[in-house]
Each structure stands twice: as structure tokens, then as C-alpha cells.
Image: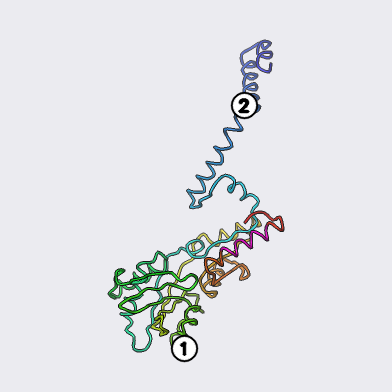
Amino acid sequence: LVASVPTAMARDWEVAKRWLYLACSLLVAGCPCALVLSTPATVVSGLAAAANNGCLVKGGEHLESLAAMTRVALDKTGTITEGKYKAVGIVAAEGQSESELLGWVASVEAQSSHPIAWALTKLARERRAPFSARAAQGYKTLPGEGIAATVAGQALVIGNMKIARRLGWVADAKLTVQYESWEERGYTACFVGLAAGRALGVFAVADKVRPEAAALMTQLNMLRIKPVMLTGDNRSAALQVASEIELGSCCVKAGLTPADKLFLVSELKSSAAARKGGPL
């Protein structure tokens, strides 16, 4: 009716054409097919746009839930920071060759996919410290503490202060002071020692904050989304990163194991659901 009656009564083509356009617009708007076709196309477009910007979303349901989000948990290394560590230095214990120690560490780290491994193998090449991934046997990860392998017949362990205390390495005052000094400066420090309880040395690496990270925090705050930074790194290094992106210390959770991170995310989800504050 919208098309036929006005067109039949129109005295010129311009008037008739206008009513034909209005009729077509009404037909498209009133037809459910347009809505059915446009919705999945919009979702797919949104998923593709997110992927092009480095964000993988599991599906349309999760994409739509972002509109109600009030909290976001972000990992530090590789997310807030570039994940491209640079070696700061290595210090060997008394009677231990620094070059030999670096070679052992690089041999173990050569089997790891962690960003720290790349920095240490690069340092070994620069200093011409001999190392080989084949030299390390029985490589294994110690969740929340470090890594271990057998090199040159020695059960070598590389890790944080937690494992250093457990194995008694902190008894070496020189290495402990150097470790704490690096940590106070915001570096990621690690102990190297034998599983039998002897400390062999310490090393430190540093990472850079992504240039866009500070702007992201500002945008999240403007959207009333509270960011939380999660990291297995030491608290001093985490707070150094937080200060560069203007993130409050209360929003920093450091020294976490993978299991700790999972528990913390579950806890944040539960608290958000209890307050009906939207998804995490």
C-alpha cells in the first residue's frame, strides 16, 4: 500500500520515486531477515577487529559481555611490558667462574620459552661463554619458584628468593645483598645454585613498559573499569612498572604462581558477581 497507492496517485515521477524509496526502507526495517543477517556479521566483524589488535575473544557472547565489564586483570610481562628482557648483569660466588656460570645458566635457559631465557642466551653469546641446550638434561619447571636441570653433572636450579630460602642459598651474604640491591632498583633478579644447597651466583634482567600502557590505564579509568596487574615477579619490580603507568600499589599483585593467578581471577569474578558489578 505504501508503494502502490501513492505511486498510482502521483502526478510526476519524482514524487512516485520518493514513495518507492520510503516503501523499500519500510520493508527492510520491518523484515526480520535484515536483523538476523546483520547480527552475526557484526559479531564476526568485532572479533576480527579485536584479533587485528592482538586480542583474541572466544566468541560473540564474551565480546558482548565487555560492555558490562568493571574489572580487568592484566599480566605484567608481555602485556603491560614489552616482554623483551635485557640482561643487567651476573655475579658469581667466591671461587666460581662467572663465564662458566653464565654458560651453565644459558644452557638451561636455552630450553625455556620464557622471555628471560632470550636475554641470558644473548648475554652468553656477547661474552662468548660456551653453552649448549644439549648440555642441560632433565629440564623441568618449578611452579612459582624457577627451573631446574642437570648441567655438567651438577643439579642446577635457577629461581627466585622463595627457592633460595628453601635451599639455604641466602646464607651467602654477598649474593643476597646483590640480589636485594637489584630488586630495589626494580629489576627482576634470580639466584643460581645447586639443589644440594650451594649458591653459585645471581643475575638480573630488566623489561620495558609498553609505550601505550599508560594511556590504556587512563582510558580504563575513564570507562570506570578498574585494572589489576598480576605477576610472578618480585613486588619491587612490579611497583616500578606500576609507577610508570600510574597504577596504584593496591592494584598490584606480585610474587604469584600460576595457581595463585587462577585463584585470584576466580576470586575477582566472584566478588564482581556478588556486587552485580559486571564481568571480569
Which residue is nearer to you in this view: 61 or 197?
A: 197
Residue at the extreme right of the image, as rendered: 275
Marks 1 and 2, the one that precedes in the sequence:
2
Based on the picture, tell me whether residue 265 belongs to the magenta stretch: yes
Q: Measured along the vertical axis of the image, is residue 44 above or below residue 266?
A: above
Q: Main secondary structure of the magenta part?
A: helix
Q: Measured along the vertical axis of the image, is residue 266 above or below residue 106?
A: above
Identify the coloring.
Answer: rainbow
Check disc 1: other Cα within 10 Å, few if <14, some if 14-19, many if 20+.
Answer: some
Based on the picture, tell me whether residue 63 belongs to the magenta stretch: no
User: At which x and y percent is residue 207?
Assistant: 45, 68
Q: Amino acid at mark 2?
A: Val
User: At which x and y percent is residue 49?
Assistant: 51, 46
- In this image, 56 relative to 88: left or right? right
Q: Measured along the vertical axis of the image, is residue 210 above or below residue 198?
A: above
Q: Which residue is mark 2?
A: 28
Q: Which residue is mark 1?
A: 171
Q: Amino acid at mark 1?
A: Ala
The residue drawn where x is 55% and y is 74% is: 235
Which residue is nearer to you in this view: 143 or 159?
A: 143
Label 1 residue SS:
helix
Query: Which part of the image, by quadrant, shows the C terminus?
Result: bottom right
**Highlighted magenta segment, given as a residue range:** 262-272
- In this image, 23 relative to 132: left or right? right
Q: CA distance from mark 1 to mark 2?
A: 78 Å
The residue drawn where x is 65% and y is 25% is: 26
Query: Which part of the image, by quadrant, shows the N terminus?
Result: top right
Tag nearer the camera, 1 or 2: 1
User: At which x and y percent is residue 246?
Assistant: 59, 67
